[in-house]
Each structure stands twice: as structure tokens, then as C-alpha cells.
Amino acid sequence: MTKQIESSIVSYSAESGKIEGYLAKPGTGTPRPAIIAIHEIFGLDEHIKDVTNRIAAQGYVTLAPDLYSGSEALRSTLTKTNVAAVKEFMQMLPPGKMRDTAIVQQELAKQSEEKRASLQKVMSLLFGGLPKSQMTQDLVKAVDYLNSQAYVKKGAIGSVGFCFGGGMSINLACHARTAACVIFYGENPSPIDLLKNLNGPLLGLYGGDDIRINSNLDQLVRAIVEYKKDLEMRIYPGAPHAFFNDTSKATYRPDAARDSWDKMLRFFARTL
């Protein structure tokens, strides 16, 4: 592990336009394997930057792209203020009820008309309106960007994503020549047959109480078996969705977070 890291804001050209990202890398001139860290639905925040720094401290060049930065429509709606307001609202909901339409509408009705309209606009984009196919291609360009850097070991690039980012991590691995993929409680690729194109081994880390995500894990396993891919999986009993995020008191589970972090590092050591 290296304690000295260098961090900066970088940009690269992609399908959506110019994508900005947070880059952290070991303070060494030796080319290192690289990892793309993909943010949660709430965007590139301080938590993901902290995760990026932690991974870089383990000796990996780590890039966290801001997938909302390339589109003016996304940038103008998914501002830090708007996203923070939605995040605060969602954290008020009972655990596991973020996608329960009836409960969400019930709580929205308690808000002022102006705030309700703003929340609904942002939430409709975050939960169903994001251009995921285009964002996947933006991530493919991130792989190209890293492969073009002298400080990156060519071809030794993996990805890890959380929640929304977990689904994007596996999407990326089905569309680019990556060497390893980690999913933290993310959705399966759609259609599931994309897994026939999966590049490199896959590590899936899930919370036992994450019913919505886990309800489709049987499809993931069947496809992995059918297409003869390399899969490791760990499900943490009693852990909810977002158990790794230490900024969320409601969902953070320290034991599961520590163990999953260790498994991720061992996985990347094996694959990269």
C-alpha cells in the first residue's frame, strides 16, 4: 500500500461530450493497473472521491467519472443542490422503500407545491430517465483514456460501481476490454444476454436485505453459468442496499463494508 497519492480533476472526450472525472494515482513513475470507480445515483460526491483515494492508496490509478457532466440537460437539472434535496428526501423514507411508489407519493404530498415539483422533476430523471446506454459508452471512452496514459499499465483496467454505478460497472464490462468487474449491489445488465460479452472475472457483493436487487440474482447466476464466465459472489445477511456507504447512517453496516472492501482488494490483486 502507498500512502502518497496525487489527485486532480481531468476530462476526456466521450459520446455525451466532455466528461469530467476525479483522478487519484500513486505517487510513482511506474505504470500501474487502473480502476474506474462509478458513482451512485446521487452523482460524483465526496464519498466516491474518498473511495477513489482509498483505492489509489492501494496502488491503483483510479478514475471516478462524473457521468452527469457530459450533458447540459443533466448538468442543469442534477445540480448539487437538487440532488442533495432528493437525497435528503429519500433518506426520510422507511428503509428499503425508495422505489415504493405509494410511499414516495405519500411523502411527496407533504411537501410544498414548489418543492414537490422540483423533487419530482429530479427524481423522474434519476429513477428511470437516465441515458444509461450513452453513459455506458462514456465509460468505454474512460477505458480508452486510461489506456492512453503513460502512468497506466495498458490492458490492466478494472471497474467497480455502487448502486446505480454497480449496474454501470457490469454494463461497461460487457462493452469494453476491461480485465475485471466489481458490482456493489447493482442491477443486472439488460438484456441479461449481454453477459455473453462479459470481459474478465466478475465479483458481486450484495446485501441480504436488498430485496429489489436480489430478486434478479438468479438470472445473473444462470447467465454466468450458461456463458461460462468467472464469478465470485458474496451476500451479507442483514445488510441493506448501500451497506458500504459510510455517509448513510441508516444503511451503513461496518462489518459488511470491511469484509467487502477486503474481498474487492483481493479480487483486484488476482485479476489486475
Image: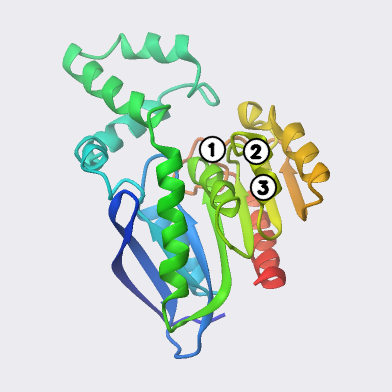
The residue that label 3 is drawn on is 205
User: What's the residue at 61%, 49% (across, down)?
Assistant: 183
Can you tell which quarter of the image residue 79 is in?
top left
Q: Is residue 235 left or right of residue 30?
A: right
Chain-order first, disc 1 or disc 2: 2
Give the percent coordinates (x, y) of residue 95. Answer: 53, 26
Label 3, secondary structure: give it.
strand
Q: Nearer the viewer, mark 3 or mark 2?
A: 3
Name the residue that disc number 1 marks: 251
Q: Nearer the viewer, mark 3 or mark 1?
A: 3
Q: Which residue is mark 2?
A: 239
Q: CA distance from mark 3 to mark 2?
A: 11 Å
Circle count: 3
Q: Name which of mark 3 and mark 2 comes first in the sequence.
A: 3
Amino acid type shown at disc 2 = Ala
User: In x, y percent, where is residue 168?
Assistant: 51, 46
Q: Quadrant of residue 230?
A: bottom right
Q: Residue type at mark 3: give it.
A: Leu
Q: Which quadrant is the C terminus positioned in?
A: bottom right
State left or right for residue 120 relative to residue 217: left
Q: Earlier in the sequence, mark 3 or mark 1?
A: 3
